[in-house]
Structure formats: C-alpha cells, structure tokens
Amino acid sequence: MSSKALIGSAAAPLGLSSCFDSTMRLYRLVRHRRTYGPLGSDDWRYLDFVMWTYSAALLVFLVPLAVAPSTGNFHFFTMATVMLVGPVGVVAFVSLLSPTLPIRCSSDPRGTPMKPAVFYAVEDVASVDFKEGRAYRQALNARWCMSPPFRQMIKMQTIFFSFAAAVYAGITAAVTFFASIHFAFGWVLGQLFLWAAWVAFMSWVIARVGLRRESMWWDARKEGEGGALGGGEKIGSIGRRGETGNGALEDRDVEGKGDPRDSGASEEADEDYPNTIIEVKRAP
C-alpha cells in the first residue's frame, strides 16, 4: 500500500466519527434546549462551551486530514491530533486568567469572569452527553459558589490539562520533524491513546484528592470548625455568578442552604435571568 493510500485510509475514520458526535450533540442542544441547554436563556443560538470549543477544534483538525493525502505532505497528517488537542489546551490556559466573557459561555452571562475550562466541560458533558439536564447545571453551579475546595480542584484539573496538552504537542512535533514518516505515523496514532489514558488517570487522582479535601471541609463546617452549618441554616448567599472578579464569594440574591454535594436544586425564573438557581436545599 502506498503512503498516500495509507494516510487517506487513516484520515477517513478519524474525521467520520467526529461528524456523528457533533451532530448528535447539536441536535440535543437545539431540539431539547429546555431540557439540556445552558441556564439563563432558551435561545437555541446560545450553544454551550463544549459545543463551540469542540466545533472550532474539529474544523482545525480536519485541515490536515484533507490536505495531507491530496498534497503528499504526509508529515502534516501526523500533526492532525495536535490541531485537535492544541486549541482546547489554549482555551484551557486562557480560562485560568479569568478574562471577562465577551459573549455567553454555557450558563455564565456576558460580562462575568470566565471559570476554569474544566468546569464548563464537566457541566456541559454531564448535562448533554450523559443526559443529566439542567438540574445538573444548577447543582454544579451551586456547588461552585459554595465550595472553595471544589473550585480549587477544578482549577487544578484545568492547570493539569493545559500542561498535558503542551506536552502532547511538543512530543508530537518532535517526532514529526525528526523521525521518518513510517515511524511518526505509527507513533502519533498510538501516542494519542496513551496520552488519553495518562490524562484520564491523573485527572482521576486529582479528583480523588480534591473531593476528599472538599468532604473534610464540609465536615469541618458541619462540626462548627469553619462556621455553623445546621440542617436548614443559611451558610451564605450566592448570586447568579456567585463570585467577584477575584474569585471571592459575593452576596447577592440567591440563598444557598445545606451541602450541595447531596442536594437538589429548585428552579424559579425571573425576568432578567430565567432558569437561574434560586435555592439549594439539603436532600431529605
């Protein structure tokens, strides 16, 4: 088999699978907006963070898949996965700087500080792909507002992914430019799965440690070490965004009650911000 035929046969399944994934996601967000869509708007044009980021990365990813077989620049093909992972890593890094959002980002309105990208990824994937819906978005946003250890864990996950994306891009570029096309072709396709396994394992470790710390923090609050936390006692006020630009909690018009790790959220719309969280109560 020629190099052109080999690269072409590998490019087809890589691009084809992504077309089905993105189409199904888009259908749920548009057709079942009130069930799976972000909080704050029922306008179908406001897609979530994952949909926009995935679509942009997918368009960049498709360029080498289409160009490499037709031009014979086969080394360009081995950089295809970098063009999928790289843009996501850049977005994750930028999110750590907490820029002011110029447009709506998932459930966050324009003009608010951007959360770490992993928060939006968890919110959107669980709500749409795993069909948890808007109730999950409400509960996760309430947890973000009320739990500093949870916010720290999400930030650490985002830092790690940004680093992992840079490592992946660096190794792939080195292999692409300094190895033969035959070695680079096999290495890069295999490396993607090895890298994904490493990222998944490290993310699991960070989550385990972070959730353990969060559990200890909530237990300390319940015991009165960090502030009284009774069964129906108010532990603080959270707003639509729930934090100021520097990450501090801000008192606004939404009350939080109990521990959001095991809570359900009730929903009540208002004129300015429909589908926002109004109250979070301890589960019976």
Image (tube, grey):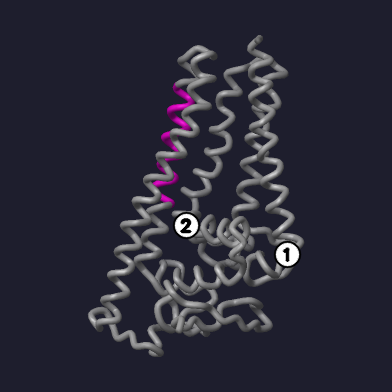
Kindly indicate the quadrant of the structure image that contains residue 125: bottom right
Q: What stretch is highlighted in magenta?
A: 158-174
> Is residue 57 depicted above or below 260 in this figure?
above
User: Identity of the amino acid at label 2?
Assistant: Pro
Residue at x 64% of width, y 24% of height: 10
Check the picture and name the quadrant holding the C terminus: bottom left
Q: In the drawing, does residue 268 fall left or right of residue 223?
A: right
Magenta residues: mostly which secondary structure?
Answer: helix
The spot of residue 120 in percent (x, y) is: 53, 58
In magenta stretch: residue 7: no
Residue at x 51% of width, y 64% of height: 113
Helix, strand or loop for disc 1: loop
The spot of residue 217 in percent (x, y) is: 29, 71
The spot of residue 200 in percent (x, y) is: 43, 45
User: Identity of the amino acid at label 1?
Assistant: His
Task: Return the mark for residue 116.
Answer: 2
Task: Return the mark for residue 222.
Answer: none
Q: Distance between the residues labelled 2 and 1?
A: 26 Å
Helix, strand or loop for disc 2: loop
Check the picture and name the quadrant holding the N terminus: top right
The spot of residue 18 in percent (x, y) is: 66, 40
